Amino acid sequence: MARMKAGRAVIEALRAEGVEYTFGVVGTTTNSIVTEMYGRSDIRFVDTRHEEGAAFMAYGYARASGKPTACITTSGPGSTNLLTGIALAYKGRAPVMVIAGDVARDYIERDGSQAFDLVGLFKPVTYSARQVNKTERIPELLHDAFRTALSGKRGPVFLGIPRDLLDDQTIETDVMAPETYRAVDGRIPGDPQAIQRAATLLAQAQRPLLLAGGGVIDAEAGAEAVALAELLDMALVPSYGHNDAVPNSHRLYIGAPGRRGSGEVAEAIHHADVILALGTRLSQSTTYWNDSVINPRTRIVQVDIDLQEIGRNYPVAVGIAGDAKAVAQQLLQALRQEFPKGRPNPAWRAEIETLAARRHARLQAELALTGDPMMPQRVYPELRKALPRDCMVTIDAGVAPGLSYDRLHFDLPRTLFNYAGHGGLGMGYSVGLGTKLGRPDRPAVSIQGDGGFLYTSQEINTAVRWGIPLVSIVLNNRCHGAEKYQQQRFYDGRYIGVDLVNPRFDRLAEVYGARGFYVTRPDEIADAVATALAAGGPAVIEIPVAEYFPPPAPTPGGH
């Protein structure tokens, strides 16, 4: 065993798990940890301008790279500022470890300065929240935290370390490899009898549909999902916010579901007689949690890594707890025994193609939209011209960015990032920065409205200091669009708190040292995006757009 400082023991445990970046703002209770990264290139501390930005960046990094990361923050508000971002990691299944340097134990439960029940505060938005009670237990509890964060359904964990267990403390410890304290290989297969029942049901289906969820991305099961769809001519649909789970260019792909998705997809789901829900919770955003989207007569085969999600929102014909990739491979093997060359379904395939063509025609018609400022729908066909196939796109909350779900095109996994059912306005810019750190080989853009952009725009400074070449596209409609629409429709146009007065965002970027672009015509968008991506540094493209009050959500069921 080696004797080392407690702070170094923390860093060595992170490095053993492959953590390359940590995120946060320095503080007196964590100096004994962060200073152990001084002069190192194998693990770095990204100092953000606010802890919320750190949590959002960590989420983006973890989702883009598929690897764990950590936020390191000081006591009191230094840690409570993380809560919104860690809640996003909780909803979005991102393995983010929170290491909070807490106040000394003498001040806990005595209303000491910056003393809060951090364990209690983080418990609802993490898979595990614990406090170290002895310096010698730091490595053990870090190992346990990683075991929790990376086993089965991934997610954030919290570990508080009181300052008196860190400062000037040393311990005897060995740096252990992850495989010595947790399973690092292997996938959980489904029960063989359940697999056979599911295969039989799918083989008998006349209008089968494969709903690919976030579990498909987590398990890297996109190829298996496509193979299953092709084998039985299944309609191919991602769950809400996971458009990148399956290639959007595939002939069986229709579009994205949900309030910001397409009515054509809602029609396909409602008409399906069997749904293979692969790696999805059948969430509210996808299904509305009522019978108007999923027909009560539809039979559901649900696959999820989390046993508690099976049948939680809809009754299932067959429930299979297991890894999406392993289960999909089992289903393929069972179905190929009966259909070695596949089972064509020309009638259903023709209906799928008709729905996809109808959606395409609807979007093509938007090219005729005119106005000054331009309608926000006109932005997206121009973006599709400019965004590379492997470009990572982060979509903030808001009406104008929300148009992305039905209008942008994704063919590769881990290229779409969003608020994951969290709904947190303002996450877009910082999450986009994290995605670029997580996959530096891919271009990255973020799409925000003007309201969301100013939540964390101070992190432009972080992007400039760290040289992170994120291109941020700000659709400026000078209002909180969804709320203004609601006040117009239901509150007699008594507008309050919804109209915004903004700076010029391109000039704000330039003040910070980034590139700024200001675009007023659709035919300027593609060139501006291509120029910004090629510049190799942080950039902000402001596009003034008209206020857009969305029509009522498409009525599911095709009516």
Image: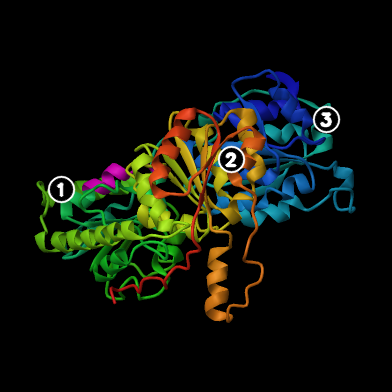
Image spot of residue 469 (x, y percent): 53, 32
Task: Count residues near mark 1 (Cα–Cα under 10 Å), then give few for <14, some for 14-19, many for 20+.
Answer: some
If you read the primary sequence from the N terminus, does the residue marked by circle 3 or circle 2 appear first? 2
Question: Is residue 32 depicted above or below 195 in this figure?
Answer: above
Viewer-proximal residue among 497 and 185:
497
- Which residue is tagged 3? 167
Q: Is residue 351 above or below residue 395?
A: below
Can the viewer see residue 519?
yes
Residue 283 visible (yes or no):
no
Does residue 365 appear to the left or right of 179 in the view shown?
left
Residue that numbered label 1 is attached to? 336
Could you classify mark 2 by the number of other residues whose Cα lies within 10 Å: few (under 14), some (14-19), or many (20 or more)? many
Q: Quadrant of residue 370?
A: bottom left
Which residue is labeled 2 in the image?
58
Task: Name the kind of residue labelled 3 in the image.
Answer: Asp
Q: Position of residue 164 (x, y in %)?
A: 84, 36
Residue 451 located within the stretch drawn in magenta: no
Tell me the tag on residue 276. Answer: none
